[in-house]
Amino acid sequence: SEQQDQRDAPSRSAGEFDAVVIGAGFSGLYMLHRLRDTLGLSARVFEAADDVGGTWYWNRYPGARCDSESYFYSFSDRLSEDLLQEWTWSERFAAQPELLSYLRHVADRYDLRKDIQFSTKVVAAEYDDASGRWTVRTDDGGQFTATYLITAVGCLSTTNLPDFPGRDSFRGDSYHTGAWPHEGVDFTGKRVVVIGTGATAVQAIPEIAEQAAHVYVLQRTANYDIAGGNRPMDAEDGRKIKDNYREIWQTTRETGFGFPYHIANRTALSVTDEERQQIFEEAWERGGFRLGTTFNDLLFDEEANETAAEFLRARIRERVSDPEIAELLTPRDHPFFTKRPPLENGYYETFNRDNVTLVDLRPAPIQEITPTGVRTADAEYEADIIVYATGFDAMTGTLFKLGIRGRNGLGLQEKWAEGPLSYLGIATHGFPNLFMITGPQSPSVLSNMPVSIEQHVDWITDCLRHLRENGLDTIEPLPEAERDWVDHHNEVTQMTLLPRANSWWVGANIPGKPRNLYPYVGGVGTYRLICDEVAARDYDGFARG
Ligand code: N01
């Protein structure tokens, strides 16, 4: 009966759990399954949205699709071989609705929803030394306690809406791509300004241009966009992948970026110009991030990098008919792959359309948003709709909004005022029993996310099992282990060209954000070995109590 259901329904305002998990995207769903079904712990997941999906719940802008091949952007055989065999992806790179329905399917299949509290934001999470428990408060006045606090908030979940003067005076409609209306936006006959040319904009602009009367694309930095090569999934190809799934997943765990292809063991200048051109062309034809794996020194050696950069610049000139526009679209101020290269499907050709205008913001930045459009230093662009494709306060933005306080009331944001300080990107000294899935200083966004998510969730699962089997209550990194990890992280970073660009990877997109490389660039395979080694050596570098 309804009454009975209400009595059995978990309370939305209070409760004591073994673990609280924040977020119900890829990581929160898998973490909940492991906590509950593998370890037999009690857990509550808090999710701001009214459904599961995380990134794939919020990012519903036109053209939103995955930049990793669908078949390797899912849960692996660690979760279920059956699910892998049963699930069929319709496109090589799945679009947002298909990814969301996949995650919904996972939630239902593993009966996860009953432990997820939707439409609820965590506003504070405080560690109490005396009880050794976390107290978690929610925006609707709820208060919960847990032994373990696990953040599963993704890396790109706090939108960045630049503080342009007059922003709220605009009389038309404006949208951030990362908080897109569920009913969609009709661009038919509209004048549209799109601000930004990152991975999101590159997906959205071709689709918006198909509908709109006119699109002004406001570009601050030109990117090295790589051919995406999306296409419907061929049944035969799907079959082959499924037949080799074990091996494929194993490879994703060993390679640098969590993809099932290895970085070629050769340097860019060790081959002739003709050979190099052919290698780049083959990778280009195959599409996706393969281009970044053609040589092993592209991220380390400027001259090597320049060969790939030049290859990509030539592709732009081939596809954009107006040489002046092609030149504006051509990146010259940062090495290839020091900003996340967007994958494009018809982006460059969009600039051959009569209804698309590229606006270069470098000589004339945005000065203000007016009631009728956007004014730059030298013109006003009238618009009915403004699309902010301006990205995210990545990696720490959401973590800092959770109000996390560790021992002695120390705030996470306070502790990280000069930049993240973590051990393995998963834990931080002063915050016992806090685990951050794909936290800063772990491979995270420099990898195929589900692979890194699974690695973290599985590692945390083993760690919790270890604690419980050994009658231990707490685990927390030692300060010296944390210092060593941060030093190692910085050392690896300095070996690469990544610090050269003003990317969100280094926090350059957010005014005042400490400049550090946020993700760890040592590689997925290497990182996994390090984490496994730490666990095998009795959680070396952690204090346990
Ligand atoms: O955000 P971005 P995004 N004035 O930060 C510009 C992932 N992703 O949403 O380059 C003017 O990359 C900014 O200019 P600049 C992927 O990891 C994944 O596109 O800073 N312009 C830039 O052009 C990606 O990297 C997928 O000079 C301003 C743009 O806005 C990440 O999400 C798909 C400005 C922001 O680009 C973020 O991508 C899409 C200002 N004040 C995205 N502020 C898939 O795999 C910012 N800009 C599916």
Image: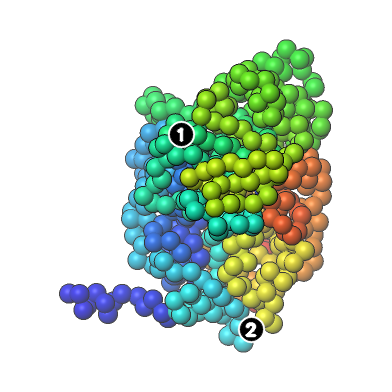
Does 529 appear above or below 189? below
Q: Residue at x 53, y 60 (%)?
A: 152
SS under mark 1: loop
Q: Is residue 343 left or right of residue 361?
A: left
Q: Residue at x 34, y 40 (%)?
A: 86
Is there any visible trace of residue 305 in the rendered image? yes
The residue indicated by pointer 1 is 213
Q: Residue at x 64, y 60 (%)?
A: 396
In the foreground, 2 or 382: 382
Q: Is residue 396 left or right of residue 33?
A: right
SS under mark 2: loop
Query: Which residue is most to the left?
Result: 1
Q: Earlier in the sequence, mark 1 or mark 2?
A: 2
Quadrant for the C terminus in the image: bottom right
Does 371 appear above or below 345? below
Q: Position of residue 543 (x, y in %)?
A: 70, 72
In the foreground, 456 or 438: 438
- Give the class, few, some or many, for how many residues have Cα within 10 Å of label 2's Cα (few <14, many ≥20): few
Q: Which mark is residue 485?
A: none
The residue indicated by pointer 2 is 129
Q: In the rendered structure, which amino acid carries the disc numbered 1? A: Ala
- The quarter holding residue 332 reads top right
- The quarter holding residue 299 reads top right
Q: Is residue 463 left or right of residue 87?
A: right
Q: Position of residue 444 (x, y in %)?
A: 62, 50
> Which quadrant does ligand 1 occupy?
top right
In the foreground, 450 or 94: 94
Q: In the rendered structure, which amino acid carries the disc numbered 2? A: Asp
Q: Position of residue 155 (x, y in %)?
A: 59, 54
Does 42 appear above or below 387? below
